[in-house]
Amino acid sequence: MRLRKENILFDIMTGAGLYLLDSLRDRVADRVDDLRERTRDTYSTASDRVRRASDVIRGEDRRFISTTTALLLGIGVGVGVGMLIAPASGEETREQLKDRVRDRFSRERESATGTYGQ
């Protein structure tokens, strides 16, 4: 009689364990698939970065050259447009800026109270 009860208890525990492992297997499989996909994405990103870096080192990257050219072209156009629409000549503009700076610093000296650091 005692052997039969132990067998029943063992069967119940084994069944419960298998049931829990089966549900765990499905969740683990989903997690493994997610991990595999994330690993592929990371590898792809790293591979692209290494390829681009080696292209730059070998001088085969044309995007850097085109970006630099666009930047220099933009600066040139900006300076040209600025010279065309400037309200005064360069000499007059420098004098105005010098006067503004001089006035600003003289006002700050007059409004300063106390001494710094004491």
Image (spheres, rainbow, N blue to C red):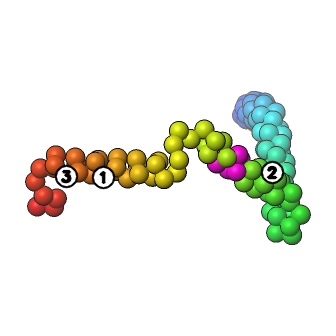
User: Nearer the observer, disc 2 or disc 3?
Assistant: 3
Q: CA distance from mark 1 to mark 3?
A: 11 Å
Mark 2 vs mark 1: which is more N-terminal? 2
Residue behind mark 3: 109
Q: Position of residue 20 (x, y in %)?
A: 75, 32
Q: Position of residue 47 (x, y in %)?
A: 84, 57
- Give SS at disc 3: helix
- Give SS at disc 2: helix
User: Nearer the observer, disc 1 or disc 3?
Assistant: 1
Viewer can see residue 73: yes
Instruction: Say whether residue 78 is magenta.
Output: yes
Residue at figure coordinates x 83%, y 42% from the top left: 37
Residue behind mark 2: 45
- Amino acid at circle 3: Arg
User: Nearer the observer, disc 2 or disc 1?
Assistant: 1
Image side of residue 69 versus residue 76, left or right:
right
Span of residues in magenta = 74-79
